[in-house]
Amino acid sequence: MDELHGFCVRMLGPGDAARAAEQAARAAGHGDRVEALIAAATACRARDEAAPGLAAQGSEPPGEPIGLAQTVARELALATAKLPERQREALALRELLGLPHELIGRVVGVEHVAVAPMLARARLRLRAEIRGAGEPRAECLERDRALRTIALRQDSERVAAADDDWLVEHLGHCAACAQAHAAMLEASVCYRAWRLEDAPSGGSDGAETVPPAAGPDR
C-alpha cells in the first residue's frame, strides 16, 4: 500500500481532493518518510480548511447495493470526519501506518508525550461516533493517567514499571477506566477494518511506498 495515498484518503476521503493532496506532497520532493508524511499532512489540512468535511464524502448513491467492506468504509469515514483534525491524523499514522509515537508527534506537530493522550481521546471519540453514543466517562481522579498508560501499552510503547503495575491494579477496581480500555481497543479494531476504496496513484502498480526514515521504527 502506498503510504502517502492511504494517509490522504483517510484524511479527505477517496476522490480528487485526496489525489491532489498526495500529488502536492510528492511534488515537495521529500525522500525521508517522516518529511513526506508531514508534507502530506500539510496538504490535507489546506484542502480540509478549504472544504471541511471531505473525509465524509465518497458514500455510495442511495439505493445502490454495496458490499460489507464498502459499508464499513463509509461508516468509518463518516465517524472519523467528526474527529478533530490532529486526532484524525494521529489515528491514521498509528492504526494505518503503524508509526511509533515519536514519529507521530513529528508529523502531527506535537511533543511525543502528547501523542498517547491524543490517541486515547481519538479512539474514545471514534468509538462513540460509530456507536452513536456518548464517550464512556465517569468520575475518576486518575482517568488521565489511566488513558495515557492504556494508550502506551496498546501501542507497545515504553511504559514505566510503576505505571504498568498501577494500571493493572487500577483497572481491577475502576469500572469506568476498564470500560474506556475496552472502548479504545474496539475503536482500533474497527479502524483497522477500514479498507481503502480508492486505487493508489503512486507508481504504475500502486505498490510504491514512502522511503523509510533512518533508524528503526520499532
Image (cartoon, rainbow, N blue to C red):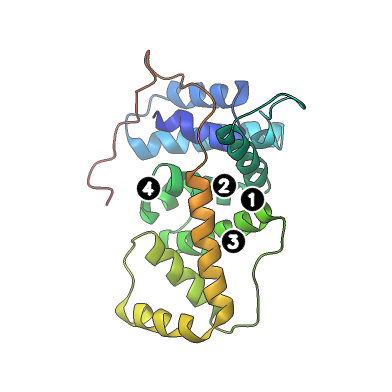
Measured Cα–Cα span from mark 2 to mark 4: 14 Å
Dot placed on the residue nearer the N-terminal end, 2 or 4: 2
- What residue is shown with label 1? 84
Is label 3 or label 4 in front? Answer: 3
Q: Residue at x 65, y 82 (%)?
A: 139
Q: Secondary structure at mark 1?
A: loop
- Identify which amino acid the numbered label 1 is placed on: Pro
Percent position (x, y) of residue 165? Answer: 35, 82
Measured Cα–Cα span from mark 3 to mark 4: 20 Å
Percent position (x, y) of residue 108? Answer: 49, 48
Do the numbered discs 3 and 2 sit on residues whose CB atoms are within 8 Å?
Answer: no
The quadrant of the picture occupied by the N terminus is top left
Q: Residue at x 57, y 27 (%)?
A: 18
The reply to whether residue 119 is in sight is no
Do the numbered discs 2 and 1 sit on residues whose CB atoms are within 8 Å?
Answer: yes
Q: Which mark is residue 99?
A: 4
Dot placed on the residue nearer the N-terminal end, 3 or 4: 4
Measured Cα–Cα span from mark 1 to mark 4: 19 Å
- Identify which amino acid the numbered label 2 is placed on: Arg
Do the numbered discs 1 and 4 sit on residues whose CB atoms are within 8 Å?
Answer: no
Q: What is the crowding at mark 2: few (fewer than 14 residues within 10 Å), some, or many (at least 20)?
A: many
Percent position (x, y) of residue 59? Answer: 68, 30
- What residue is shown with label 3? 124
Measured Cα–Cα span from mark 2 to mark 1: 6 Å
Q: Residue at x 62, y 36 (%)?
A: 71
- Is 6 displayed left or right of 140 in the figure? left
> Which residue in the rendered view is the most extreme toward the right?
62
Q: Which mark is residue 41?
A: none
Measured Cα–Cα span from mark 1 to mark 3: 13 Å
Q: Secondary structure at mark 3?
A: helix
